[in-house]
Image (cartoon, rainbow, N blue to C red):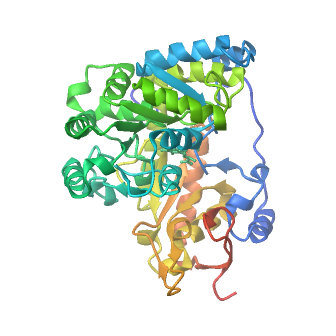
Amino acid sequence: MLDSPFPFEPFRIKMVEPIGLTTPTERERLLREAGYNPFLIPADKISIDLLTDSGTGAMSQAQWSAMMMGDESYAGARSYYHLRDSVQKVTGMPYFTPTHQGRAAENVFFAALGVGSGQFVPANQHFDTTRANVEVRGARAVDLVVAEGLDPHDKSPFKGNIDVARLEQFIEEVGAAHIPAVIITITNNSGGGQPVSLANIRQAKALLSRYGIPLVLDAARFAENSYFIKMREPEAAGMSVAEIARATFDLADAFLMSAKKDAIVNIGGLIGLRDETLFQKVSTELILREGFITYGGLAGRDLEALAVGLLEGLDEDYLTYRIGQTAYLAGRLQNAGLPIMEPPGGHAVFIDAKEMLPHIPQRQFPAQSFVAEVYRAGGIRVVEIGSVMFGSIDPVTGEEHFPALELVRLAIPRRVYTRSHMDYVADVCAEVYRRRKALRGLEIVYQAPALRHFTARFKPVNS
Ligand code: F0G
């Protein structure tokens, strides 16, 4: 294949889903009705949906045909054994169980591990649901990502790495007995989809072994992380992506996986374990909450789709296209002048709204203002990851707290959109960027007491 800035889609399209087109007047009305929050706009009024890369991928002909062979037996279904073969091949973990999605895996795992008050769970960076599942049990989730991971313009290759020196310091401070596990999220979703190196995981593992603390991978984007390792880490240059993935899992004592990302299924999750006693505890929790250990809240056909998707996610031609597509969109946005988090991550491009809209103070939600405008201008749905999602009001003083980063995330569903879709997204974002000085802030007219970003309603300031 010719070298091109955008490796062409390594698939043909044989089933199509029409995209709803809307007029500017219609979008203006829909936006007002939705309180300037695209979460509240019906999906068929969205033309390009970059809300999330989770469960939104397109399954292959191999996955759809495997689904027809789904065995819906309650216990010991044939489909379970197919999934077991794939999990073993990709991860080598001796024990595993399916779950209905990633956060269910987190819930079951932390319950089985006995995570509770007085304990700490350090990570490079917890994803929101992982943090919530730790903290709801009374333990504290602590983020120890390397300093460069917090600088949007630092171009280091592995900005998702955990700071091993700080981790050691932290363990010494609170005591290993109070740390039931350490999590490494690959790639680091909360930090811009940045990868973690094999060397970093190895160093973390060596440290944790000295203290007898298990290392757990949040492996939702294990394939994209492995691809970045192949491209950027010299020791891995001669390895296949599948070999790198295996080497990564070999360093872990357990993994949790939302299969809705790199395993390219619309629903599903996994827990993988090395320890038999812990597996027995996980099984007890799983049966209570998700279902029997051979189906974990999924239908037999879902297990089949997952068995195939786990392997397809590691296909190198697919990953070249996938990572290339994200980089292509990032490059086009950058050429138009938009400030983005660098280097672009695997599953999404993040725009720095603080830098882009300095005239809108954080209390007027600059990133949300851009999100609303991109919908109004082009029917594109993207998501705010800033002061709406992470801002909070002190219940005692009433003072507002804002996060350090004010970002807009453009998450790309897998195998769904083509280059012309990406060009359209870039053109719309560039057009909004050109008239950024005219964008106004928003004020909240309704917010829920927790997780307000899903349902908050806004109005433009001074209206
Ligand atoms: N871990 C990571 C790193 C994630 O990105 C997600 C989900 C989960 C766990 C939870 O998995 O959704 O299957 O329950 N991330 C989605 C996103 C929602 O949009 O980034 P789940």
* Residue at 38%, 52% in the rendered image: 125
- Answer above or below: position of 106 versus 144: above
Quarter of the image where the C terminus is located:
bottom right
Q: Is residue 398 visible?
A: yes
x and y percent of residue 391 in the render?
Answer: 51, 72
x and y percent of residue 437 in the render?
Answer: 52, 77
* Count of marks, rendered view: 0
Left/right of residue 381 with respect to residue 329 in the rendered view: right
Left/right of residue 209 with respect to residue 254 in the rendered view: left
Left/right of residue 423 with respect to residue 79 in the rendered view: left
Q: Nearer the viewer, residue 295 or 35?
A: 295
x and y percent of residue 428 in the render?
Answer: 59, 58
- Answer above or below: position of 309 versus 431: above
Quarter of the image where the N terminus is located:
top left
Residue 19 position by quadrant: top right
Q: Is residue 263 visible?
A: no
* Residue at 47%, 58% in the rendered image: 138
**Where is ligand 1, by quadrant?**
top right
x and y percent of residue 15 in the render?
Answer: 74, 26
Residue 302 position by quadrant: top right
* Residue at 22%, 41% in the rendered image: 211
Left/right of residue 377 with respect to residue 129 in the rendered view: right
Q: Nearer the viewer, residue 68 or 136?
A: 136
Residue 153 position by quadrant: bottom left
